Each structure stands twice: as structure tokens, then as C-alpha cells.
Image (tube, helix red, strand yellow):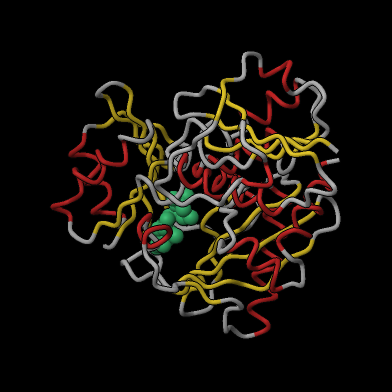
Amino acid sequence: MKVAVIFGGKSNEHQVSIVSGTSVISHLDKNKYTIYPIYISEDGEFYEYTKDVKKVKILTINDKIEEIKKIDNIVDYLKDIDVVFPVLHGQNGEDGTIQGFLSLLGKRYVGCHTLASSICMDKEYTKMLLKANGINVAKGVCVKKYKNQYTLVNNGDYKKVNKEEILEFVKKEYELPIFIKAVNSGSSVGVNKVNNYDDFYNYLEDSFKYDTKVLIEEGIKGREVECAVLGNNDLITSALGEVLANDNFYSFDSKYNNSVVNTVIPANIDEDIIKSVQEVAKKAYQVCNCEGLSRVDFFIQNDNKIILNEINTLPGFTEISMYPKLMENAGISYSELLDKLIELAR
Ligand SMILES: Nc1ncnc2c1ncn2[C@@H]1O[C@H](COP(=O)(O)OP(=O)(O)O)[C@@H](O)[C@H]1O
Ligand SMILES: [Mg+2]
């Protein structure tokens, strides 16, 4: 079977995808699959690896890709490929764009299709859909920026506002801390925790560097847990993994640059709460039309209320990432997981 693994990508999670992608390449069974690694540069060009796939090393976050050659015609290149595994995070990878392209070419590929990918990439639309289906999400409001004009989007009400009015609204409706997040981002890029209103405008504009739409949310107090879901029709849910954020919140640094162990698998939580979280994870997966895999992330408040934070359709896939670790805990090794995902894609 010919499997193309696509990684890198035009996204602010480019580097993370390089680590995930090379992990996937090195764990795919070379006896079962002929592997075609495809690297997408930050400016969106497609490259093939010229080195022997067996020698592909798992790269780390600041490594540069070497021994690559530009692919002249990606459509031609993919012609004989049986299954594509897009190990891409964030924009142009996890948002339905590559999925739409592959669907158009009639290719089978790992993971969610276009609709689910697009919905889950957009934190505003994910929350709208979940809320409409009775799943708890953090109270939030969206702000859109077009040139220098802001629009406040509050429960379907669109109102043109200036910055002062945004702050006024937030002060009235929310208690500190609040979170400001770029809507279509990941890996905590463009995510800011606001503990003091003096920082509000700076953080707002920081988040706007990454997107034209930001989400302002109440800060949830409680434990942060993640659940892995696998399947198309019959769904497997994993135990929960807990994130022990050592940086105030689960920031980019605590995700990738901090060697301190900051996840616990399986989380030490009451059995009935675990079951409820798994049920919500499954429901959310179905509500959002997910297929193949997704990692569903939650907060469990001190009163045990379960709040869904986000759904990652192509979660981190390094050897130490939560998704493969949770599956390993469920008795599915990394290589077996890759086999299952390819089978689900077919
Ligand atoms: N409303 C919130 N309350 C408390 N913590 C939050 C909230 N939103 C985000 N966080 C923290 O910020 C981190 C990153 O935010 P998240 O929404 O998961 O974005 P990303 O897609 O970048 O992972 C979370 O893992 C969590 O630690
Ligand atoms: Mg997250």
C-alpha cells in the first residue's frame, strides 16, 4: 500500500507538524507500506524527501528539513497513492482545506473530512454547534476585526463597536481572569490570559495578529483533561489525560519547550466523572461530524461540571503527545494506531 504522509504546512503550527509528521513516518510499518513523505514549506510549496524513509529521524521543534526536492506537480505526484495521512496542524491542514483538495482528487485520507475539520478549527463555530446540542462550553463573546473596525458578536447579535466599548462590555459581563484567543489557531498561539484590565488592549491586539476573529472567554477554574476518540461509526474513547499547566495555562512553551512532565495518564478522577466525560466526548465527535480521530479537550470544574473546551481533529502526534499516549493506555501501540487510522481511512 502506498501511503503519503504530508507534514509541515502553511500554519503557525508548522514546527509542531514537523515533529508529528516525522514521528508518524518513523513508526509506520515499512513492511506494510511504501511511504512517501511530503513536506509543505511555510510558504506552501510541496517537497518530497530524497533520503531513504527508513533513515528519517524524528525531528524536534527547531530542526530544519534537509534532503528535500520540490514536487513539480502535486496532483500528478499523488496519482498512485492509496492513502494520504495529513499530519498537519492548524490552518491549511486541520481546517478542511487539504481535506477538500484530497476529496476533490478522489483520495482516501486519514482523519476528519472537510466539514468536521472546518468546524473544529473555528472555535466560534464549534461552540455554537456544541451549545445548540446541549454541551456545556465556556461563556464567551467573539470580536471580529475588519481593517480598523470591530464587531462584537454576542449570541447572534452583531454590533459595530470601538475598542473602549469592547472593554466596557467585558468588564460588565465577565470576571477576571478572562482568556482572549485567536479563533482559528492552535498550540496556544494567540492565546492570552488576562489577569488585569490594563493588559486588555495589548492582549486583544496580540490575538488579532493571528486571526481576524478572536474569542473572549470566562476563565474556567478546574482541572484540564483530554479524551482521545477513534473511529468512524463504532467509537472508542480512551481514559482521560490530565494537563498540569505550570505556566498559568497550557501555553506553547509548556506544550513544547518545557521538559517538566506536565501530563498525567490516566488522570486520577472518579470513575463516574470519567464516564460522563467520555460520553460527552463521543457526542461532541458525532455532533461535529468527526471521522477517524479527534482529541476532545475539557475542563472539569470544582463542582464537577464538565465544560468542553475544544476539539482537535489532528492532535499532536509525537511519541509523547497525549493522543497516542492515551491510545497506548487503551492497549493500542503507536504503530497499531497508525494501522487502524489507515484502515479507517480506506
Ligand atoms: N476559558 C478558559 N479558561 C481557562 N483556561 C483556558 C480557557 N481557554 C483556554 N485556556 C487555557 O489555554 C490553553 C490553550 O487554549 P485552547 O483553547 O486549548 O487553544 P489551542 O487551540 O491553542 O490549544 C488551554 O489548554 C487552557 O490551558
Ligand atoms: Mg487546546
Tell me where residue 208 appears, x and y as whole percent.
31, 36
Q: Is residue 21 above or below residue 11?
A: below
On screen, residue 126 versus residue 163, left or right, reads right
Q: Residue at x 77, y 37 (%)?
A: 3
On screen, residue 122 versus residue 246, left or right, reads right
On screen, residue 124 versus residue 240, left or right, reads left
Quadrant of the image occupied by residue 298:
bottom right
**Frontmost residue, 113 versus 21:** 21
Q: Residue at x 83, y 47 (%)?
A: 344
Q: Residue at x 57, y 84 (%)?
A: 268
Quarter holding the N terminus is: top right
Tell me where residue 18 appears, x and y as whole percent.
52, 43
**Frontmost residue, 268 versus 197:** 268
**Tag count:** 0
Please identify the residue farthest to the left as the structure is shown: 198
Q: Is residue 137 above or below residue 288?
A: below
Q: Is residue 343 above or below residue 249?
A: above
**Frontmost residue, 29 versus 273:** 29
Tell me where residue 48 appears, x and y as whole percent.
62, 28
Tell me where residue 272 appears, x and y as whole percent.
68, 82
Q: Residue at x 72, y 57 (%)?
A: 283
On screen, residue 60 versus residue 150, left or right, reads right
Quarter holding the C terminus is: top right
